[in-house]
Image (cartoon, rainbow, N blue to C red):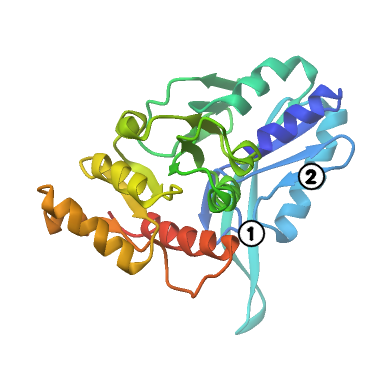
Amino acid sequence: MKIWNFIYSKLKNDIEVVLMIVIDSKGSSPGQIGSKMSVAHDGELNGTLGGGLLEFESVELAKKQFSKRNYVLNITQDHNSTNLNKPKEIVKTGSQQIAFYLFDKTYMPLIEAISKAKTGRLTFSQQGLLFNRESDIKSQYESKLINENNWSFTEKIGYSNFLYIFGGGHISVELSYIFRRLGFYISVFDDRQKSQNSFKQNNYANSKKIINYKKASKYLPDGNNVYVVIMTYEHKNDKKVLRQLLEKDVRYLGMMGSKSTVENIFSKLIKKGYSTKDLDKVDAPIGLNINSKTAGEIAISIAAKIIKVKNSEN
């Protein structure tokens, strides 16, 4: 959503912006479908279409829209390379179609709604841009290209992945910082009524709540895009939270603790009737073993493991 925030900030200052979006991409074209880049009238850029000469040429075309006043323009760009075996032969290696949209301050309500949306869908067409808060398309993108005057491109927007952190300590701040940059929606929970400084100062989480850990499960939905980290300030709280979340159907469930602490918690849960199969889905001790020492390093080890899980096949 960063690019929409950029556009909105410019429009607030009465600076027009041209948005470029790749609505179709074939071959080895550098800009993948859905890639976006904005050019503000003050010269500032945001986003990328894949870099290289094609991006440079697209930016130059975008700058011309401020004087042409074409609010929607669909341009096909070819990406060529030289055949190394036949230096004089130019080979077409890919192509992409880019839609250009010019936004002025009259678009502020629309852009603000998009930038603040948790979920939704955007439909681009030769007629303009349509935003719907309902996200009912199955895939990330849906493209319909008949010709230059009859096309549409629909994109699912908002957050695709959700991180829930139980424990508001220093490591949760570092972890929130990493995953905010990765585009996750981050929720942090703690049970200390007198909030710690780390919890108060966590400006990276989208949501922060003081809860009763005995009711932790009510704050966690099921989902293949849900990732959970348990790192409370006391191991008895870790066990309390973990016990409730074992029945949840989530993509990743990890718990912080030394090997001996984890074994102790698992042993107590088994005595309560949980099976080793129930506990096998818990990543504990959490993260990848990279001999982490500092809060930042520990957060990186956890993030690396979650990214590995996210990018693996279901």
Relative to 161, is 95 on the left or the right? right
Q: Nearer the viewer, residue 38 or 161?
A: 161
Say whether disc 1 or disc 2 marks the residue closer to the N-terminus. Answer: 2
Residue found at x 53% / y 46%: 33
The image quadrant of residue 45 is top right
Q: Secondary structure at mark 1?
A: strand
- Which residue occupies 85% across, 30% down? 66
Q: What residue did someone put label 2 on? A: 45
Residue placed at 84% from the left, 37% from the top? Answer: 64
Relative image position of residue 163 (x, y in whole percent): 45, 43
- Quadrant assignment for the N terminus: top right
Give SS at disc 2. Answer: strand
Q: Please report the residue visible at 39 percent of the width from the left and 54 percent of the height from the top.
A: 310
Q: Residue furthest bottom?
A: 85
Above or below: residue 240 compared with residue 12: below
Determine if residue 126 is in view: no
- What type is the residue that disc 2 sits on? Leu
Q: Is residue 43 left or right of residue 244?
A: right
- Kindly tell me whether residue 86 is visible in this rendering: yes
Front position in the image: 277 or 87: 277
Q: Is residue 34 above or below residue 193?
A: below
Vertically, is 169 above or below 70? below
Give me the disc on residue 79.
Answer: 1
